[in-house]
Amino acid sequence: MIDPRTILPPRGHHPSVRIADFALERYFARWEFAVRHVLCASDVEGWSMAELLALADEETRSIWDGLRLGYTESTGHPLLRREIAALYDSISADDVLVFAGAEEAIFCLMTTALAGGDHVVVTWPGYQSLYEVARSAGAKVGLHLLREEDGWALDVDRLVASFHAETRMVVVNAPHNPTGMLPTTEEWRRLAEACSSRGIRLVADEVYRFLEHDGGATLPAGADLDERAVSIGVMSKSFALAGLRIGWLATRDRDVLDRCARMKDYTTICSSAPSEVLALIALRARDQVLERSRSIVAANLEVLDSFFARRPDVFTWVRPRGGSTGFPRLVQGGPAGSSADRFAARLVEQTGVLLLPSSTFGFGDSHVRVGLGRTDLPEAIGKLEAALA
Ligand SMILES: Cc1ncc(COP(=O)(O)O)c(C=O)c1O
């Protein structure tokens, strides 16, 4: 019985809600829906409802038609969790917890799996919530710098050398936003093994999984490589359904899922009923869904390759190995100037084409993110090129 006269002390896990602004999201809040061409989106062009519903099988069509809009199971629709589990080798439906996007999954994971003083290493430049939420939860965050001169490659030896006695978690996003970094399967296994043998939890942000370029291999999922590892997935990127806001955590570590479920009681409680069914439909038709995404991205990569080949005086281009973004650098003293902030501001003003300057990643002022997933990319690149001329 709570004494109503008391001021309640914090109990259990209690993350701070004081957290730095999410710089990229603030930038998108200003621009995303105010411009003609979002040339820096990380998602793939969304499916229309009609096209997606046309993929439904008999069972999912009848679930859709008979859907009642009450609360849903807080862990996620059982059929959806089963379908998500099928993306992994060693994961069952009960090893999956569904969230409102990968973003909620990251928030719940970082605020419950870390304690004050824990050391966490996160790939960088990168998606801010992967390190910012950990930092706001009191963790000491070390950033593993991906270097352009290494082709943005993950340096497993340097990463492992940064571990110390307090290191509890390693967070790797691969394929990587914004650089398109994708380790080899051998490097990836070596990292998982290094984490496993030291009792460090590997958190694999795999939201761009299945978007590997040029026949590159899909990495084994983190959650399949170690019992304590956690895989983060979402419908937004490779599956081209960002508007569903359906994401998940997959791990054989049930304690992690249990803690996250308790946090989710304070965030969304349960997922949107229509979104769960639409995600189920898409996952059952995943071959077709992924094929569409891969072909959009592959066609756009060709357009970008030839644009960057035509304008080496303006940009240097490290071709992404996976995912739906790339991170070209402005040539210092080139015709576009040296400041990515100023270039992006001028470009959007003059042409309605939006690029994402690297300052939104806290990563200097020389790079811009380009997105490979939108079907208006050729038109947007045409406008960019005309503006440069
Ligand atoms: C690496 C990474 N993780 C997680 C997310 C979050 O995905 P969502 O916005 O669909 O929740 C994103 C989105 O850009 C991302 O790039």
Image (spheres, helix red, strand yellow):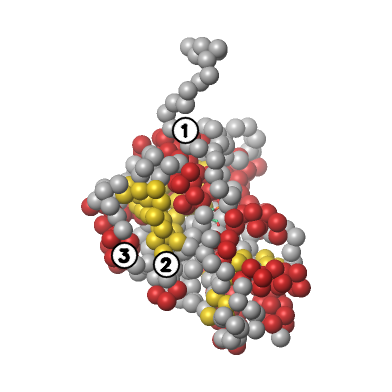
Residue 371 point in image, percent of width and height:
59, 68
The residue drawn where x is 29% and y is 55% is 163
Q: Residues within 10 Å of mark 1 (few under 14, many from 20)?
A: few
Residue in the image at 29% along x and 60% along y? 160
* Quadrant in the picture for residue 276: top right
Give the image location of residue 120, x and y in percent. 37, 50
Residue 161 in the image, given as x and y percentages of width and height: 28, 61
Disc number placed over residue 146 in the picture, else none? 2
Question: For residue 341, what is the image quadrant?
Answer: bottom right
User: Please, is residue 12 above or below residue 300 in the view?
Assistant: above
Mark 2 element type:
loop
User: Which disc, if any, is residue 158?
Assistant: 3
Q: Amino acid under label 3?
A: Arg
- 78 or 31: which is nearer to us? 31
Give the distance between the C-alpha atoms of the residues marked 1 and 2, in whole angstroms: 32 Å
Residue type highlighted by circle 1: His
Q: Mark 1 sits on what residue?
A: 14
Residue type at the position of mark 2 = Leu
Tell me, yes or no, if residue 35 can be seen here: yes
Q: Are marks 3 and 1 in contact (CB under 8 Å)?
A: no
Q: Which mark is residue 37?
A: none
N-term-proximal mark, 3 vs 1:
1
The quarter holding residue 379 reads bottom right
- Residues 151 and 230: in front is 151
